[in-house]
Amino acid sequence: MSFSRNNYGITSFLILCVAIYLSFTYLLPSETVSVKINQVEFSQQKALIHLKEISQKQHYVGAPAHKEVRDYIVNQLKELGLEVEIQHQLGINKKWHSATQAQNILARIKGTSSAKSLLLLTHYDSNPHSSLGASDAGSGVVTILEGLRVYLETNQKPKNDIVILISDAEEIGLNGADAFVNHHPWAKNVGLVLNFEARGSGGPSYMLLETNGGNATLIKEFLKANPQYPVANSLMYSLYKMLPNDTDLTVFREDGNINGFNFAFIGDHFDYHTAQDSYNRLDRNTLMQQASYLLPLLNYFSNADLSQLNSQDDLVYFTVPIVKMISYPFAWVTPLTIMAFVLFFLLCLFGLMKGKISLKGIGIGFAPLLLSFLIAVSVALFGWKLLLIIHPQYHDILHGFTYNGYDYIAAFVALSFAITYGIYNKFKQKQALNLSIAPIFLWLIINVLIAIYLKGSGFFIIPVYFALSGLAIEIFSKNKSNKILTHSLLALPMLVIFAPLVKMFPVGLGLKNLFISSIFVVLMMGLLVPVLSRFKARRFLVIIGFAIAVLFFVKAALNAGYSIDQKKPNSILYIYDADAQKAYWTTYDRKLDTFTKQFLGSNPIKGGVDKKTVASKYSTNQTWHKEAKLIDLKMPLLIKTERDSILIAKNTYQFTITPQRYVNRIEFIANTNLHFIDFSLNGQTFTKEKGGIYVFDTETRKHLLSYYFTQPDESITLKFTLKEGEKPDITFYEASYNLFTNPSFDITPRSEIMMPTPFVLNDAIVIKKLLNP
């Protein structure tokens, strides 16, 4: 009998382990997978040839290689027999206040009807100024190029036009998308967009749809297209709609009311926008998953009716192995939650009547659950803060996911497991049924909140029904045999659906969110009480959990430094204050290294040159500065048009600025609160917000505009009208990415284990000057 029980325990443990393993492996296909339309196969080798070519150099807007990459893509599209157009258009992002002369690459496969067109979208510019752009979004470019080859070789005649837009200037403000959606005639007939993106260099590619209405029709059509390896859930869909996450597709939705699907991967997030976003670091499995999305969707939507994709209804959806995707209406969320509550109370009532559970036992069951949350989540929350003190270099990674980030996820998950299991082991095994009530009740409370505030997470009710099934078996079954296998099988849906979320949140949102992983661990272990309480080796598993945590913490510590494959980011700027006739070196780094010390020395002044100098993605401030020698810099030519010569509203100003040196960007930042009644750049006006009096004001945001130059002889003209009585107290910052090539400086280059810090203006010469009225 003892031997049989051991077998049950071992088998159950293996079932849980296999379920967790499958929950991750099904997310990503093998790089050897075959993806095809009819009998024409997507060639990874051909795609990689393209990728190697376009990711050799930094190709941000204004870089010499930007044109080289554009020309290469154009030639490849022409070789496929397509007629290619370059759209030259000023693109303005009125939300981010960025602008440039975008140069979009456009081609079209004509359909047999005049129906709505399908648009394939990605961007070809890399992030300024050091990213090679292999994953973001070279992977999208080569997926589309090779996907088009496959499609064209099938000799199909699509019903719908297939428009190819390889957009420009996505990285600096979605400006290419704005140029197309708001200025190109083809945009008016687009019915659906498939957009390929990246926020890392590997991992599963998630489907995130964008729509101004409900998702029901889009999800149903997506399922009809039948992609083989979909990864998606409506939790991400709901959160994505709530958060300010913008891609090129966002412009299509907001400005054109056009629906679409994003396909983006976030793994190896430490490579995002860095010099390490290279050909060699792109995960080949991820590339094939992108292909596995494109080919079936291209084949299906090129012939589907794209005029009927709008819907008022939303679906809850999630992906699982074999079945691929399960979906049901938002309208079911509340009824399912109410039914689960009714079943829960009925089962508790029957359990009390049968003497299987007691009110005292149920009350005691809340103690280990709440204690586990308190300790495990606190350890994760404050543990990461402690690690930042122990390893201050982690602050160098501005987006918050370190090179050893996966080790920390494993460590804190193992630690949360050990803490939770250890706490539950302090309670008698015979109380297992009582202990299982509190976790189910908590899951029900969470589902009530979901039904009210976040219906996209409605699939959280699925594990509850399986847990209620297990509770019913315990209460009504007269069979006293070991039920551990039954409970293990009932836990499979929960593990398959939720285990990947434990990893996804800290990868996508940064390691400061490790506490979210701990929350999921405690929640899942609560529902696993009927299984975990029956293991004989409970204390041993707790010890194993702590041991695994220690091993991964040690591994992370040993891997906390920098190397050729894990480069240290650092930053330096030369800022010339033209009004004060002074120059400074400044950095965003918390701690100086051998590279930055050559500029700032051993005793720099704490803080930046000023608090407003240049915008950055994460509002990163300068940390140190030191006065520098003055060098010969040509000041921009500033032409001011007097107010009384402008035959429009009072308090109107016009400035034309022409750089006299090669400049990459210019930023305008307000020094005081200003209220703009109208604002235009090169004749293109910014529109007012709905119901607003002003185009924008600077009470909460001082950044007025970032303009990115694409050629040496560009000028920009600003015309704006301010609220009566206000004067344009504005500073502009003219920046060039040529610090290392300026002959006035003798700079020792970064070592092979260093790279420029992303997300901030870096390696630049900046002229700072007041825009005097």
Image (cartoon, rainbow, N blue to C red):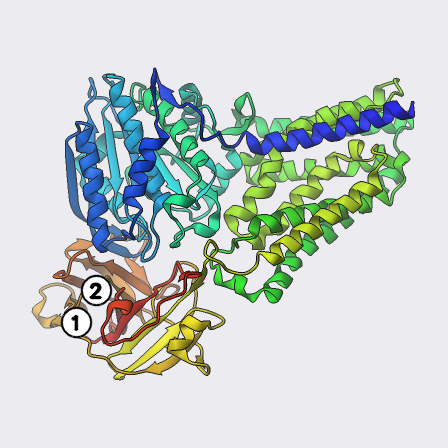
Q: Position of residue 38 (x, y in %)?
A: 34, 15
Please, what is the three-letter code of the amino acid marked with disc 2?
A: Val
Rendered position, 210 above or below 155? below
Give the foreground label among 2 and 1.
2
Q: Is residue 616 above or below residue 642?
A: above
Depth order, front residue of 649/594: 594
Sequence-wise first label, 2 or 1 = 1
The one of 287 and 680 positioned closer to us in this rendering: 287
Residue, x 79% and y 23% (percent of image)?
Answer: 472
Residue 570 at what x, y percent from top left?
42, 65
Tell me the CA gap for discs 2 and 1.
Answer: 10 Å
Q: Which residue is mark 1?
A: 636
User: Left or right of 136: which side holds 102?
Assistant: left
Left or right: 537, with 736 as reference point: right
The image quarter containing residue 588 is bottom left
Could you tell me which residue is drawn at 32 percent across and 63 percent down? Answer: 697
The residue under label 2 is: 663
Quadrant of the image for the N terminus?
A: top right
Task: Report x, y in % for residue 480.
Answer: 89, 21
**Which numbered disc covers residue 110?**
none
Q: Is residue 102 visible?
A: no
Q: Is residue 112 visible in this depiction of the protein?
A: yes
Q: Quadrant of residue 475?
A: top right
Q: Is residue 385 above or below residue 193?
A: below
The 10 Å Cα crowd at callout 1, few under 14, some 14 to 19, many 20 or more, is some
- In this view, 158 is above or below 618: above
Do the CB atoms of the residues marked 2 and 1 lie less than 8 Å apart?
Answer: yes
Mark 1 residue element = loop
